[in-house]
């Protein structure tokens, strides 16, 4: 499984996303999986990947939280969580998304 966190410099949510993603991978039995982080610095960088705002989490090249909202704008992403809108998904949402992805 290839996991990548796509992020921009001005959006700090990617750091905590990495921590929660590690917890989710450990909880689903994928503790050996490496998380790769890719800084997107230009719109051209964002156009090359399935970027939907920072942070976007991809598994095997697909957005883990499909939104239909691909963008080349270097902007932060908002996730709908059980407690409202947030800059990153909860650990529980990450676990469920990894399970639903078939891994």
Image (cartoon, grey):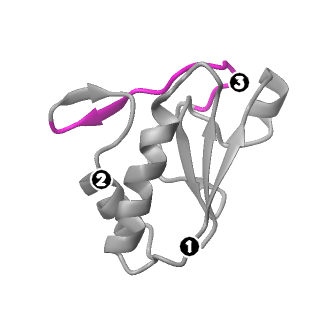
Q: Disc 1 marks which residue? A: 33
Relative horizontal placement of residue 20, taking residue 56 as reference (left or right): left
Is residue 79 highlighted in magenta?
Answer: yes
Distance Cα–Cα, label 2 vs label 3: 27 Å
| Residue appearing at x 71%, y 43% in the figure | 38
Distance Cα–Cα, label 3 vs label 1: 28 Å
* Sequence-first disc among 2 and 3: 3
Q: Quadrant of the C terminus?
A: bottom left
The quarter of the picture where residue 102 lies is: bottom left
Badge 2 crowding class, 10 Å Cα cut-off, few under 14, some 14 to 19, many 20 or more, is some
Q: Disc 2 marks which residue? A: 91
State yes or no: discs 2 and 3 in contact (Cβ < 8 Å).
no
| Residue appearing at x 64%, y 26% in the figure | 71
The quarter of the picture where residue 97 lies is: bottom left
Percent x, y of residue 82: 16, 39
Disc ID at residue 6: none
| Residue appearing at x 51%, y 37% in the figure | 14
Dominant secondary-structure state across the stretch colored magenta: loop
Q: Disc 3 marks which residue? A: 72
Relative horizontal placement of residue 20, taking residue 83 as reference (left or right): right
**Mark 1: which secondary structure?**
loop
Is residue 56 highlighted in magenta?
Answer: no
Start-end of magenta stretch: 70-82
Badge 3 crowding class, 10 Å Cα cut-off, few under 14, some 14 to 19, many 20 or more, is some
Q: Residue furthest left?
A: 83
Badge 1 crowding class, 10 Å Cα cut-off, few under 14, some 14 to 19, many 20 or more, is few
């Amino acid at each position: 499984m290839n996991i990548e966190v796509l992020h921009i410099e001005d959006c700090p949510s990617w750091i905590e996303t990495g921590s929660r993603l590690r917890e989710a991978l450990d909880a689903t039995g994928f503790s050996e999986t490496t998380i790769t982080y890719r800084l997107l610095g230009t719109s051209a960088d964002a156009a090359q990947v399935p970027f939907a705002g920072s942070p976007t989490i991809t598994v095997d090249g697909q957005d883990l939280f499909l939104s239909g909202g691909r963008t080349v704008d270097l902007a932060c992403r908002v996730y709908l969580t059980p407690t409202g809108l947030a800059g990153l998904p909860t650990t529980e949402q990450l676990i469920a998304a990894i399970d639903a992805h078939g891994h």
